[in-house]
Image (cartoon, rainbow, N blue to C red):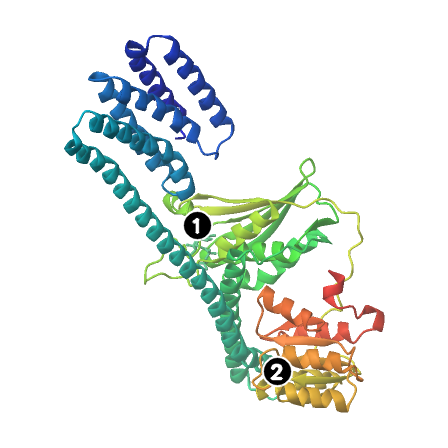
Amino acid sequence: MRAAAPRLALTLTTYLGLIPFEGWRFPTAWLVAMLILIVWERRRPGRPSWLLSLGYSGAAADLVMFHAGAAQTLGVTLFGVIIFEVLVSDYTDTRRLIVNLSPPLLSIVFIQLAAGAALLQGHEPLKVATLVASPIAVLSVFRNLQRKLTRNRSELSMARDAAEAAVVAKSDFLANMSHEIRTPLTSILGFTTLLENSQSLSEEARRHVRRIATGGQSLLVVVNDILDFSKLEANQVTLDPQPFNPLELLEGAVALVAGQAAAKGLALQTDIQGDLPPVVMADSDRLRQILLNLLTNAIKFTATGGVTVTARYHMASDRLSVAVRDTGPGIPAESRARLFTRFSQVDSSVSRRFGGTGLGLAICKALVGLMGGEIGVDSVEGEGSTFSFRVPAPVASAVIAPSASAPEGLGDPVRQGAILIADDVAHNRELVRIILETLGYTVDEAAGGAEAIQAAIAKPYDLILMDMQMPDVDGLAASRIIRAAGGQNATTPILAFSANVMADQIAECLAAGMNDHIAKPIQPAELLTKVARWLGPADEAEPIARQA
Ligand code: ADP
C-alpha cells in the first residue's frame, strides 16, 4: 500500500461508486478521512497502513452488506483489490502483512456471519454452508501463504548463512594460501639474495640466480596483488596518512622502473607542471603503489616511444593529480569501462602476449576511492593511453621524519645485540641467522614455541623474532607466556615474523604482547630496518599498538 497515484485512483473510484448508494455526506466524509490518511502515511513511510486498509474495507463492507446488485459487485471487487495490493506490497514482512490484511479479512468474516444469521432467521439453514465456504477458502489461502512465506524466509536465511560461511572460508583460504606461498618464497628470495652477494659465483651462475630472484619477485607481486585485493574487498585496508615530499615520491617511483624502461629502449620522463608543495599529507606508500602499478603497466604494454609522468598540484582543492601517458597500443573504447574491474584484461585470449592478473587497476581504483579521489583513462587506439588519478593531499607544515633507519647492506659496520629466532622451518632460521650474523648480531635459534619459552627463561635477549604458526606452542601463545612470566625477557621486543599478513592476524600479534610484524618472505632491507629500530635506544622502542 505504498505508491500514492494508484491509491488516489482507488480512493476516488470508491468515492464515486459510493455516491449513488449513500448520497454525498457519508462518501465525502470518507474521502476526506482517506485523503488525510494517505498524506499521513506518506510522511511516515514504513508505518503499517492498516488504517487505510480499514477505510477501504469499511467502504467495501458497507456496499456488500447494505446494498445489492452493482454495489455488491463494487464492494467485492474492492475487497479483492485491497487484499491483492496488501499481498503484493507486504509479502516480505509477515507482521505488516497480517496487520494490513486483518481489516478486509475480518470484514469478510463479519459480513458472512451477519448473512448467516439472516439466513437462519429466514429458516434457510442449508444455505449457511455456502456462506461458511468463503471464509474457509480465504483462511486456507491465507494459511498457505503464511506457510510459504515462512519456508521462503528460512530458505533465504539458510542461503545467507551459507553465503556468509563462504566469505569466511574464502578469507581463511586466502590467508592460508598466502601463508603457504610466502613460506617457500622466503627461502627462494632470501637465499638468492645471499647468493647474489656471494663472490664465488661464475658469471653464468650469477645470471641464473638473478633469474630465480626475478621469478620469485614476480610471484611475490602476484601473491601481494591477490592479498591486497581481498583485503580491499573485505574493507580491511586502512590508510596511514603521513607528511611526505610529493616530488621525491614521484622521482623515487620513476627511478624504480627506469631499468625496465631502459631495457625496452623506452624514454621515461617526468613533467612537473607548476610547483609542488614541499610537504603534503597522504598515504605515501599507497600512492607509490598506485603510481608503480600505472608505470609498470605503461612500460609493459608499450613497445616503442616512451612513458611520461605528469604531476600538478591544485591549491584550490588541495589535490595532487598525476597522469601516466604512454605511446602504447591504446585501449579500445568498449574495453575501457571494465578496465578497472577485477580480473579484467583487454586481451584475455590464450595467445595474449602479456602476463598479469588483471587485478592491478582494480586495486588502484579501490585505493584511490579509499583516499576520496578519482581515477580514469583516456586512450586513442594505436597512439597510446593516459591513466590519471587525482587525490586529496593537503599541504602539511610538519617536518618529514627521516625514514626509520635506512636499510643497511650486508657489509655494514658490526652491530651489537642478542637475538632469538623462533621458527619451526629450519631454512628460515638459517636464512635469518646468516643475514643477522653477517652484520655482527648474535643469534640463537629455537625450533618451536616451547623451545623459545625455554630459551627466554634461560637467557636475556635484546630482541625475539617469533614465527606465528608453529606446531607445538604457536607464536602467539609463546609470546603471551614470555610476557606473563615476567622474567628477564618480559619487556624484550618481540617481532612477529610471519607469513600471516592479514590485518586481523597482525592485530592478534599485537594483542598477544608482540611489538611489531615482519612479513615473510623476508625482505632483508625490511628485516634489518626493523631489527635496527627495535634494538635502538629504549625510548624509541614503543610498541606500534601504543603509537597508533
Ligand atoms: P594486469 O596488468 O595484471 O593484467 P591491470 O589491472 O593492471 O592488470 O590491467 C588490466 C588490463 O588493462 C591489462 O591486462 C591491459 O589489457 C590493460 N592495460 C592496462 N594498462 C594499459 C596500458 N598502459 N596500455 C594498454 N593496455 C593497458
Work out whether 48 lies above or below 216: above
Q: Are marks 1 and 2 in contact (CB under 8 Å)?
A: no
Numbered circles on residues, count: 2
Mark 1 against mark 2, which lies toward the viewer?
A: 1
**Mark sitting on residue 194:** 2
Q: Which residue is mark 1?
A: 339
Residue drawn at the location 45% of the way across and 34% of the way down: 48
Q: Is residue 67 left or right of residue 315?
A: left
Foreground pick, 362 / 231: 231
Q: Residues within 10 Å of mark 2 (few under 14, many from 20)?
A: some
Looking at this view, is 6 or 32 the one in front? 32
Badge 1 element: loop
Q: Residue 416: percent from the left, percent from the top?
A: 80, 83
Three-letter amino acid code of the residue under disc 2: Leu
Distance between the Cα atoms at labels 1 and 2? 39 Å
Amino acid found under the numbered disc labelled 1: Leu
- Ligand 1 lies under 8 Å from the Cβ of mark 1: yes
Quick one: label 1 or label 2, which is nearer the N terminus? 2
x and y percentages locating residue 124 in the rendered image: 16, 29
Which residue is located at x 80 percent, y 84 percent?
488
SS at mark 2?
helix
Identified at 17% across, 27% down, the residue is 123
Query: Is the C terminus in the top left, top right, bottom left or bottom right quadrant?
Result: bottom right
